[in-house]
Amino acid sequence: MTQSKTDSDNSRGRKLQEIVRISQLADIYGNLLTERQFSSLSRHFEDDESFGEIARVLQVSRQAVHDSVKQATAALENYDEKLGLLERQQTLMELSGELHELAGQIPAIAQRLHAIAQKIEDTATPPSVAHRTEDDV
């Protein structure tokens, strides 16, 4: 693979990560943005519209859309820097996944515990000793 292909792939990966992060931040803090900021941001990142397309729909200049998206993105990052809700949300989702995984293991663990308990009981119970009768003597 050539260096330019690798750089291009890395650039696309970073761009995708940026879009996902901004979408997540907008889900959490979007209500704190102005209606115009939220609309411009959503159209650009979620609907993949260009600044020119958004400008035509909103009947404003392309530069106004660019500025609105830039301000909205900066505001979202600022909110998250102060409140840290995105990281908390991600941590909670990871912990929830771990709980679901552990809960799925409970039947197998219970079965193993019963088997161990049975072995303990079998080991603890002395073998039956036949009683001698007078006829055996």
Image: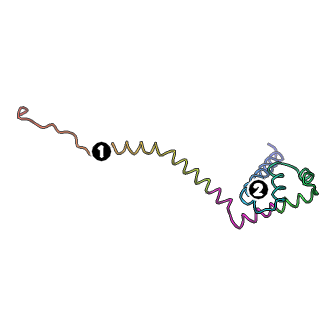
* Relative to 15, residue 64 above or below: below
Q: Quarter-wise, where is residue 72 in the image?
A: bottom right
> Is 56 placed left or right of 89 in the picture?
right
Q: Quarter-wise, where is residue 77 in the image?
A: bottom right
Q: Mark 2: which amino acid?
A: Ile
The front one of 76 and 124 is 76
Rendering coords of residue 129 (x, y %): 17, 39
Q: Is residue 70 magenta?
A: no
At 55% from the left edge and 48% from the top edge, which residue is drawn? 100
User: Under tag 2, what secondary structure?
Assistant: helix
Q: Mark 1: which amino acid?
A: Glu
Q: Earlier in the sequence, mark 1 or mark 2?
A: 2
Counting other residues with Cα less than 10 Å from the Cα at mark 1, is it few (<14), some (14-19), or many (20 or more)?
Answer: few
Q: Which mark is residue 59?
A: none
User: Under tag 1, what secondary structure?
Assistant: helix
The front one of 95 and 2 is 95
The front one of 62 and 122 is 62
Rendering coords of residue 10 (x, y %): 78, 49
The front one of 49 and 9 is 49
Q: Using the numbered discs, state the Cα–Cα distance from disc 1 to disc 2 in whole angstroms.
A: 59 Å
Q: Which mark is residue 22?
A: 2
Rendering coords of residue 32 (x, y %): 76, 63
Rendering coords of residue 17 (x, y %): 75, 52
At 89% from the left edge and 57% from the top edge, which residue is drawn? 65
> Is 77 placed left or right of 36 in the picture?
left
At 28% from the left edge and 44% from the top edge, which residue is drawn? 123
At 76% from the left edge and 62% from the top edge, which residue is drawn? 76
> Is 68 placed left or right of 99 in the picture?
right
* Relative to 122, residue 67 above or below: below
In the rendered image, which residue does mark 1 sit on?
Answer: 121
Chosen colour scheme: rainbow
The boundaries of the magenta stretch are 72-91
